[in-house]
Amino acid sequence: MTLRRQIQFWLISLFAFCAFLYVFSGVLLPFVAGAAVAYLLDPVCDRLEKLGMGRLWATFTILLAFVFLLILFFILLLPVLGNQLASFLERFPELVRQLQGLVNDQMGQRLAEAAGINLADLQASMAEMVGQGAAFVGKLAQSVWSGGQALLSILSLFVITPVVAFYLLLDWDHMIAKIDGWLPRDHLEEIRGLAREMDGAVAGFVRGQLSVCLLLGAFYAIALAVAGLNFGLLIGMGAGLVSFIPFVGAGLGFIVSMGVGVVQFWPEWPMILVIGAVFAVGQFLEGNILQPKLVGNSTGLHPVTLMFALFAFGYLFGFVGMLIAVPAAAMIGVLARFALKQYLASPVYTGSRRLSKIGPEDTASQEGANE
């Protein structure tokens, strides 16, 4: 097959895959979630096999423990988080008005004097900014809620996902061997090498970042709850779960918690400083301990690239797109680095083809002319 035919074949395959995601994005969530669970738990299953347990019993044990922990989470934490979320959404407009009034009355005059601007203009600007922020939060919550309804019901998600994960985890090694048998024989080693690099990037980031998110979420939630912050459990868990986007999770959590803390504790500055210190300690732990130990530089993705992938895949394929955004971006990054390596070694970059057309006599005469 010529190079042109190969490019056409892979472009058509990519288009068919994207069309499949677009058409069936409304029903793919349980299956994508099941595949993600199977991928995450496959190393554990392999380790149990090495210890002498059969694949069937290892799969059954792992899935049973996973479902048990999931049920425990929904029984113990979900009601508390749901109540805090409902209360937070109900009180959000009032919190915004209190914060705006507090800033205008207590700090507005000082800020206006320091900046040399009119207080009325400052208040109008802040009111507009707060209104835009509230509108954005409302639209975001509405889109998430409508998207969740459009994908599938929660019941079907938690019924189908464990079943899909069980069968995929049980047959994982056989599926990998079958796919390996479909690879083009002429490029077998190159494709295997790229697949290993992709697996290292995706596994390192997904498994490592998932651990970071859970640990940070637990730290933020416990610390804010101990500090007595209203909605501390909800804000901490949310900040931890969104921390897979660099600086976004901690930034949003810090802004929301400081806003709630100012309204709740003002004028008790020490308590407000405690809230800020929680996120300072969390950032220190994430940047110096958790990220280097659990994630490292596994994906090679720039934070801007990661955020673009999340927004782009989410826009194209909805919530399912956001689930596959990071693995897809990591795999695309591996392919892009491979393509760049091929380009740097090609005559297009080195110019070796042009030099080969110049004979030795021409080269010698050119060197003499240069002298």
Image (cartoon, rainbow, N blue to C red):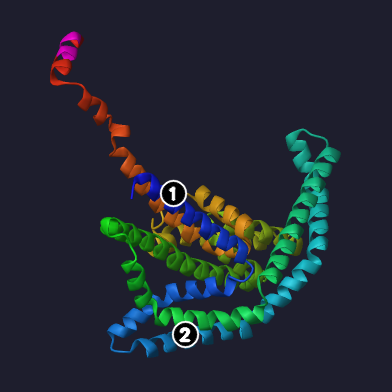
Q: Amino acid at mark 2?
A: Leu
Q: Quick one: quadrant of the C terminus? A: top left
Q: Which residues are magenta?
A: 365-369
Label 2: which secondary element: helix
- Badge 1 vs badge 2, beta-carbon distance below 8 Å: no
Residue 311 to residue 205: above or below:
above
| Residue at mark 2 | 63
| Residue at mark 1 | 8
Name which quarter of the figure residue 95 lies in.
bottom right
Decide if residue 267 is on the left or right side of residue 16: right
Dominant SS type (magenta): helix
Residue 164 numbered mark, or none? none
Which residue is rendered at x = 39% and y = 80% of the image?
171
Q: Indicate which label's residue lies in the foreground, 1 or 2.
A: 1
Decide if residue 286 is on the left or right side of residue 74: left
Image location (x, y in percent) of residue 102: 80, 54
Image location (x, y in percent) of residue 330: 44, 56
The foreground one among 156 and 178 is 178
Which residue is rendered at x = 35% and y = 48% of the image?
338
Q: Amino acid at mark 1?
A: Gln
